[in-house]
Image (tube, helix red, strand yellow):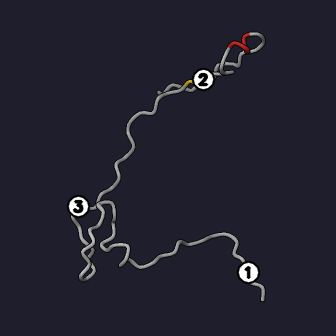
Amino acid sequence: MAPVAAIDPPVTGADRRTTTMEYTLKGAQIAGMPRRSRTYGRGRVCSHDDCPTRLSQYNKRETCSVHTGVTFPRLRGHTKHLKE
């Protein structure tokens, strides 16, 4: 079971003037490392004809940014209506 964070009570009265912080936060240290980024192979080249661009090992597409089609994210929320 992981330790629970505890907060010391604030210092009051004359002791307050001599301390640099009113309270101290104590907790458990983060365990483990974050996951590694997914890789898709080294030394890959854009699959478009006559394109010598080397792709990043982190690029999951088979084409470079020049030959990849433009995609727009789906936007939610309010839209501005044009005045007619």
The kind of residue tagged 2 is Ala
Q: Which residue is mark 1?
A: 81
Residue drawn 24% across the image and 82% down it: 50
Residue drawn 24% across the image and 61% down it: 41
- Mark in the foreground, 2 or 1: 1
Q: Residues within 10 Å of mark 3 (few under 14, many from 20)?
A: few
Q: From the top left corner, tell me how far across and down residue 70 is, in percent.
A: 45, 78
Q: Which residue is mark 3?
A: 42
Q: Dividing the picture into quarters, in which one does residue 45 lie?
A: bottom left
Residue 52 versus residue 1: which sits nearer the camera? 52
Q: Is residue 62 above or below residue 42?
A: below
**Could you tell me how far apart the alpha carbons at marks 3 and 1 are, in whole angstroms?**
47 Å
Q: From the top left corner, tell me how far across and down residue 63 is, in percent.
A: 32, 74
**Could you tell me how far apart the alpha carbons at marks 3 and 2 are, in whole angstroms?**
47 Å
Q: Residue furthest left?
A: 43
Residue 25: give its label: none
Task: State left or right for residue 61 relative to residue 8.
Answer: left
**Could you tell me how far apart the alpha carbons at marks 2 and 1 are, in whole angstroms?**
52 Å
The kind of residue tagged 3 is Arg
Q: Residues within 10 Å of mark 2 (few under 14, many from 20)?
A: few
Q: Compare marks 3 and 1 and give the one earlier in the sequence.
A: 3
Residue drawn 66% across the image and 21% down it: 21
Q: Residue furthest bottom?
A: 84
Q: Compare marks 2 and 1 and give the one earlier in the sequence.
A: 2
Task: State left or right for residue 32 relative to residue 4.
Answer: left
Q: From the top left corner, tell me how far across and down residue 47 is, in percent.
A: 26, 77
Q: Compare marks 3 and 2 and give the one earlier in the sequence.
A: 2
Q: Which residue is mark 2?
A: 6
The quadrant of the picture occupied by the C terminus is bottom right
The kind of residue tagged 1 is His
Q: Dividing the picture into quarters, in which one does residue 59 lie?
A: bottom left
